[in-house]
Amino acid sequence: MRTLVVGDVHSGVRALEQLMDKANVSSEDHIIFLGDYVDGWSTAVETIDFLIRIKDTHNCTFIRGNHDELCREWLLTQRENPQWLIHGGTATRDSYLGANRQKWELHLDFYAGLENYYLAKDNRLYLHAGYTNLKGIDFEYFEQSFYWDRTLWELATALSPDLEPTDPKFPKRLTHYKEVFIGHTPISKLKVVPPHNAANVWNVDTGAAFMGKLTMLDVDTKEFWQSDPVHTLYPGERGRN
């Protein structure tokens, strides 16, 4: 059994279908999705439909992303958040306006069941964005940090590669877990890039909402697979560009 982690999909179900084939994903594999399933391309409803289907046939863990929470809030209230709309929400809203209320309720159940993080038995941590407490996730004051924080990745990338975890100056926040896998902060919005490692943090958001590809990573071997540039799968659409 492989553990496979998937970066931010942003409604790019066509790219996700490519990855399932490219990586030859089987029902024996554990697929961990890092959140932000919607907001970007036009197939938001189709993306969530796909995820709901595969959770019945595959071993899946679904992490909560900030865009998933924004979408859920709109589905519950229909209050339009201007910032959400300009950051991919318009395409998601339009997708859901073409679906019936029964579909909305089914998807609301999916969004409500998302997890803020997943800590595996091998002490690898998976979450959408980050955490701020120096003692780790169990001591986080604000759960929104799990899907909004950007300081964890900023911290990891600012560290000197020569700084060892045993050094007194090594950030305590990074000492609690073998590895941390995140999305949320695109490594690049303009070009194709691989997933990136800094300290013990792996960022798997390779800009699928923009001009990049969607990425799936084997957490043990670090082999990875990428879709075509997602914008090429949605000709005539802007995504979040």
Image: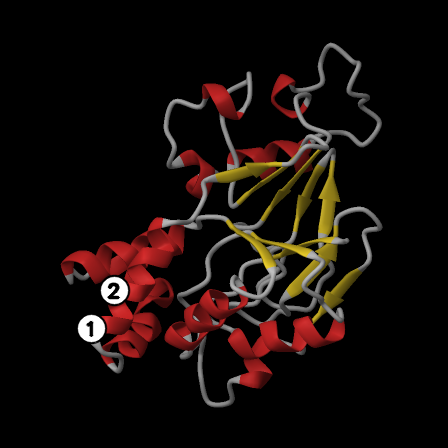
Q: Is residue 200 above or below residue 83?
A: above
- Is residue 240 visible in the rendered image? The answer is no
SS under mark 2? helix
On the image, numbered disc 2 is attached to which residue? Answer: 105
> Horizontally, is 16 left or right of 72 in the view?
right
Neighbourhood count class around disc 2 (C-alpha, 10 Å): few under 14, some 14–19, many 20 upward: few
> Given the current orientation, which residue lies at the most extreme top position?
168
Which numbered circle lies on residue 238?
A: none
Asked whether the residues under the numbered discs 1 and 2 touch, taking CB atoms below 8 Å apart as contact, a structural biologist would say yes
Q: Please determine whether, in this image, residue 18 is positioned above or below residue 170.
A: below
Q: Quadrant of residue 116?
A: top left
How is the structure coloured here?
Answer: secondary structure
- Looking at the picture, tell me which residue is in the foreground, 48 or 145: 48
Q: Which residue is mark 1?
A: 101
* Amino acid under disc 2: Glu
Q: Nearer the viewer, residue 176 or 25?
A: 25
Horizontal arrangement in the rendering, residue 186 relative to residue 148 (left or right): right
Q: Does 165 sit above or below residue 91?
A: above
How many numbered tags mark residues here?
Answer: 2
Point 66% across, 25% down: residue: 174
Residue at 68%, 27% (x, y): give it: 177
Give the residue type that dot 1 points to: Arg
Q: Is residue 73 left or right of residue 229?
A: left
Distance from disc 1 to disc 2, alpha carbons, whole Å, reads 6 Å
> Residue 145 at x, y = what percent?
42, 35
Percent coordinates x, y for residue 208 in the rendering? 57, 67
Q: Residue furthest bottom?
A: 236
**Is residue 30 left or right of 118 when viewed as pictured?**
right
Residue 176 image offset from top left, x and y in percent:
66, 22
